Image (tube, rainbow, N blue to C red):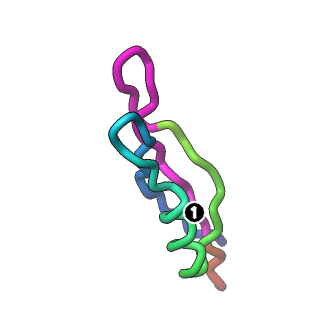
Amino acid sequence: MFTYIYVESKVGGMFTNSNHREIIDKYSKEGWRFVAAIPKSNGGYGQITSHDLVFEKCENS
């Protein structure tokens, strides 16, 4: 069986930096496997402003 978590990641723009790489590195060191990035919210003009990063971990039953 797998356990999943969803972590919000901000999309970089003109005045901000993306943080997805740091988040993926952090969770992979804790044993989580990165699965997907799902667009979470839209800014003006349909611009994506954040994603849910999906991680999974196998739970021994």
Residue extending farthest to the top is 45
Magenta residues (range): 40-56
Does residue 54 lie above or below 2 as drawn?
above
From the viewer's side, name the closer residue of 58 and 31.
Answer: 31
Q: Is residue 13 left or right of residue 27?
A: left
Residue extending farthest to the front is 14
Does residue 46 lie above or below 3 as drawn?
above
The residue labelled by disc 1 is 55
What residue is drawn where x is 60% and y is 80%? Answer: 31
Does residue 42 lie above or below 56 as drawn?
above
Residue extending farthest to the bottom is 60
User: Could you classify mark 1 by the number of other residues whose Cα lies within 10 Å: few (under 14), some (14-19), or many (20 or more)?
Assistant: many
Give the quarter of the figure containing the C terminus.
bottom right
What residue is drawn where x is 61% and y is 66%? Answer: 56
Q: Is residue 13 left or right of residue 56?
A: left
Q: Is residue 27 magenta?
A: no
Across and down, in percent, residue 58 comes to: 66, 76
Does residue 13 lie above or below 22 as drawn?
above
Across and down, in percent, residue 25 comes to: 56, 70
